[in-house]
Image: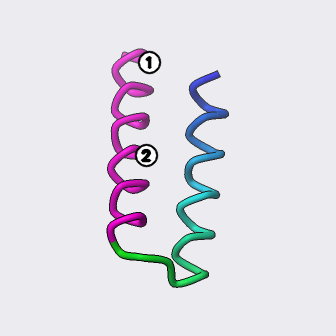
Amino acid sequence: MLDDKICKLRNKLNESIEKGEDYEKIYKLSVQLDELIAKFYKIKN
């Protein structure tokens, strides 16, 4: 479940970067992705 959220958010981030969207939006997505990845690894360990 968390894996799916990470994949979806990663895709959304990549699309935003490719489209050249606003830096703040890209940064916000990046931070959200980092938080999800941290949760993922915390659960796995």
Q: Amino acid at mark 1?
A: Lys
Residue in the image at 41% along x and 37% along y: 37
* Distance between mark 1 and mark 2 Cα atoms: 17 Å
Q: Position of residue 15 (x, y in %)?
A: 63, 69
Give me the residue at 57% from left, 26% from top. Answer: 2
Q: Position of residue 26 (x, y in %)?
A: 41, 66
Specify the principal SS of the magenta part: helix
Task: Please tell me whether residue 12 is drawn above or below residue 1 in the rendered image.
Answer: below
43 to the left or right of 20: left
Q: Position of residue 17 (x, y in %)?
A: 52, 76
Is residue 23 one of those drawn in magenta?
Answer: no
Front-most of residues 24 and 12 = 24
Q: Which of the 4 image quarters holds residue 27?
A: bottom left
* Nearer-the-camera pick, 16 or 45: 16
Quadrant occupied by the C terminus? top left
Give the number of the disc on residue 33.
2
Residues in magenta, as a range: 24-45
Q: Residues within 10 Å of mark 1 (few under 14, many from 20)?
A: few
> Where on the picture, by quarter, is residue 11?
bottom right
Can you say which quadrant of the picture contains the N terminus?
A: top right
Q: How is the image coloured?
A: rainbow
Residue that label 1 marks: 44
| Disc 1 secondary structure class | helix
Q: Quadrant of residue 19?
A: bottom right
For mark 2, give the secondary structure: helix
Q: Residues within 10 Å of mark 2 (few under 14, many from 20)?
A: many
With 8 as the anchor, is 6 left or right in this view?
left
Residue at 57%, 67% in the rendered image: 14
| Dot 2 amino acid type | Leu
